[in-house]
Image (cartoon, rainbow, N blue to C red):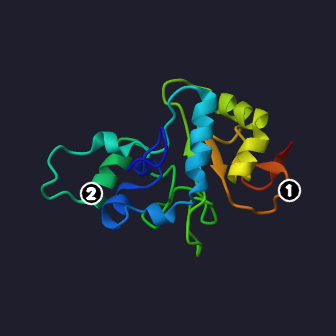
Amino acid sequence: IQVNKNFCLDEFIDPVTYFTLPDHGLRLVDPSLFDIAQLLRDEYGNPLTINDWWKHLPEDFTDFDPVKFLRQCEAIGCPCWSGIRTDLTKVGAPASAHRLRGEKVFRAIDIRDKKISGEEKILMDIVRKNAAKFYALGLRRTEDILITNGWLHGDTLNKNCKPNSIRVIDKTKCTETIYF
């Protein structure tokens, strides 16, 4: 299900949610995340990935079990939890913007270019240079690239955020505020 020029819904959703909900989990995604991912991709100029479990789908869906498929993907290190995080995973913090936690939508993505290393610095520089555009789309926080490993976290959770700024956070505090 195409959600914008370069991204499909399955990149934002885990396979169990995708194959068990009637709308494939579309209603669970903050739509701002689609626009944020697309702007980052446009400014970067190369393909970016969130989840890529779809690459491992079987040709034959006879007796397809989404939970079993999810566990197989996890076993090979395939990103399944870079968008929504359900109770099927312990990845990340319980209060993460990736989780619903009583919200109607999840509000975070971890985005990467799997073909190069160090892309999180390039992606963070793009956010810094285009902070007003990202803010207008709903981006409120990113994680400090010193604690990420090959991805850039972005979320729309407006927690302790100041107007016209994007917070850069680590596990316990704000490490930088990007003003524009």
Amino acid found under the numbered disc labelled 2: Lys
Q: CA distance from mark 1 to mark 2?
A: 44 Å
Can you identify the residue that label 2 sits on? 68
Q: What residue is pinned by disc 1?
A: 163
What element does badge 1 sit on? loop
Seen as rendered, the residue at the extreme bottom is: 102
In the rendering, at what x and y percent does residue 177 appear? Answer: 85, 46
**Image quarter (top left, top right, bottom left or bottom right) of the C terminus:** top right
**Which corner quadrant of the image does residue 71 belong to?**
bottom left
Q: Residue at x 62, y 37 (%)?
A: 40
Identity of the residue furthest to the top in this view: 116
Label number found at residue 54: none
> In front of the other: label 1 or label 2?
1
In the rendered structure, are the residues bearing label 1 and label 2 in contact, judged by CB atoms less than 8 Å apart?
no
User: In the figure, 14 relative to 39: above or below?
Assistant: below
Q: Amino acid at mark 1?
A: Pro
Label 2 crowd (10 A; few <14 / some 14-19 / many >=20) = few
